[in-house]
Amino acid sequence: MVTSSAILPEAALIMPSKRTSILVSEVGPRDGLQSISSIMPTEAKKAWIAAEAAAGVPEIEVGSFVPPKLLPQLADTAEIVAYARTIPGLTVAALVPNFKGAQNAITAGAHKITLPLSVSETHSLKNLRKTHDQVFDEVRAIVELLNTLPKDQRPHFEGGLSTAFGCTLEGHVDERKVVELAVKLMTLGCDEVGLSDTTGYANPAQLQRLIRLVRAEVGDDGLTGVHLHNTRGLGLANALAALEVGITTLDASLGGLGGCPFAPGASGNIVTEDLVFMLDAMGYETGIDLDKLLVVRDIVIAALPGEEMYGFTPDAGLPKGYHGPWGLPAHAA
Amino acid sequence: MVTSSAILPEAALIMPSKRTSILVSEVGPRDGLQSISSIMPTEAKKAWIAAEAAAGVPEIEVGSFVPPKLLPQLADTAEIVAYARTIPGLTVAALVPNFKGAQNAITAGAHKITLPLSVSETHSLKNLRKTHDQVFDEVRAIVELLNTLPKDQRPHFEGGLSTAFGCTLEGHVDERKVVELAVKLMTLGCDEVGLSDTTGYANPAQLQRLIRLVRAEVGDDGLTGVHLHNTRGLGLANALAALEVGITTLDASLGGLGGCPFAPGASGNIVTEDLVFMLDAMGYETGIDLDKLLVVRDIVIAALPGEEMYGFTPDAGLPKGYHGPWGLPAHAA
């Protein structure tokens, strides 16, 4: 049908007045740096974290409390956490592989700790050298420790379900197993679970289905975030899919640095720069200044010569005349 | 809320029995090759088109009927159209900048012709060297010619609205202008309009909004396809957004070759390989054999040494144990 007039009512073009807030959690200093062989100098890490926080990134996973002999790239995590704590308003997150790591993270002052539990037990044995039952024991011990702390010193404790969308070692991962482990982690005392596409196998339909299935068991507050990789180019499509079913926290890595050293071919977190452009252009509130964010990359490039950086927005730049939610008539933007 | 049992009813995990078909239209031999300085030998083009058709790609835009002095890369378009016509079942599409191009395309035997109309008149003058009114004159002349043809020799005639989501020269493009031009093209006699994100400015919210606005005026059958670029990494997120509002034809370019020579920085169509993986994994029917598609790339790489190819799935490979819609329990896949 072709009608005679193409003049649209103004009302159809106005943005919703209330903008949804999305928390972009930068994981480059942890997931990015653990997956490359270069070791970034401590001072460069601090400069990176400071610049990204200054650009408005509200949460940064700054390191992992693993033995330095396993991941020398992250040997300075305690110092980095202590430094990041001095940045006003920044939520300082750290990965902990076990009870000992959690102890160290708490001592260092992390606001949030994430313990990964690989849904694929084969991957769990490779990555954490532990069976599921052994990981549960660590979770129990961590929760006991957390319960001894005063409330204002107690970090938020997330159980991160890695290989939730498939495993490079086992292949298919059963969704019922993911849900079962999510429930188990919450029962053991985690504050929240997260879903990680460690291997970059996820697709938007699968992601929405699994988010719904897990939330049906642990509640919406029990699953607010996902950790996505861009291994097959679907990272931002998956991020969009997650937003559509109510996810409000998205992990991302500046320049798409990252991956998993024990999941061959699974390199590349979703790119912070491209993600923030997408969110900002769509009208989501991130609190991040895109212009400031795009120059943080220079710090990482200078500190990691020869490492591949991903992302398209930094090269292409923002659209001509861009000033926030994009595509609306000027008077409605 | 944490419940005691995580065993899910089987019914929740079954795919819909009817799979939606999505038409992936390969535009690499046109949009890809026009934007690079290398000239692909005619025989390599034929091998590329044949291999992609053999992989099940149902429609290929094989060239553009522009003067060879403007785009020597596409000087063999008539020969390529004639060759592609010999491939059973393949829809052979071609771009035409004007009446003369349409005449040549019809003589060569194209099944589908697309005339671009840039919503940004500045871009129109740069790209087609024509004002909007001058383009309308070409459309009128083409429709008159088409009306003289027997029905079985009449190609499908699409008006492609380029720079529909913003322009590298003008910046913001008003959605009402896009709708107005879509209606105009349909009124002049186009069979369909398409929306092109020539500059890679689109975001998912904008895309869905504009698709809805245009369809409200020209009907769902008047807009079935979009042409997306990956300039800022949002290509597949935009593709997903388009699918969600009922778009059933998606242009893509093998290896993400492409762009627009007159829109600086606007390189890179969405990558056919990654798009088809996403669609296939989600359970859409494309008719394309992913394993066969992934090796077509070798032909293009061999014929275009030194040209950058994009896409992640070709490097990462398919997920371990992948066999179609992914992430479901094995018995439901």
Image (cartoon, coloured by chain):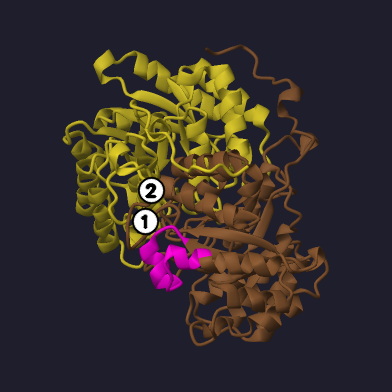
Chain colours: A brown, B yellow
Q: Is residue A164 above or below residue B205?
A: below
Compared with A279, B332 (above or below) is above
Q: Quarter-wise, where is residue A316 in the image?
A: bottom right
| Residue range of the region highlighted in magenta in the rendering | A118-136
Residue A177 at what x, y percent from top left? Answer: 42, 50
Residue B70 seen: no
| Chain identifier of the residue bearing label 2 in the image | A
Type of the residue with mark 2: Asp
- Around disc 2, counting alpha carbons within 10 Å, would you say few (fewer than 14), some (14 to 19), or many (20 or more)? some
Q: Position of residue A54 (x, y in %)?
A: 78, 67
Relative height, residue A276 to residue B203 (above, below): below
Which disc number belongs to residue A174?
Answer: 2
Q: Residue B257, how many percent across, how many down?
A: 40, 53
Q: Position of residue B273 (x, y in %)?
A: 35, 50
- Helix, strand or loop for disc 2: loop
Q: Nearer the viewer, residue B17 or B32?
A: B17
Q: Are marks 1 and 2 in contact (CB under 8 Å)?
A: no
Instruction: Tell which of A224 and A228 is nearer to you.
Output: A224
The residue at the point 37 percent across, 32 percent down is B15
In this orientation, which residue lies closer to the viewer: B100 or A212?
A212
| Residue at image mark 1 | B313
Q: Is residue B13 left or right of residue B194?
A: left
* Residue at mark 1: chain: B
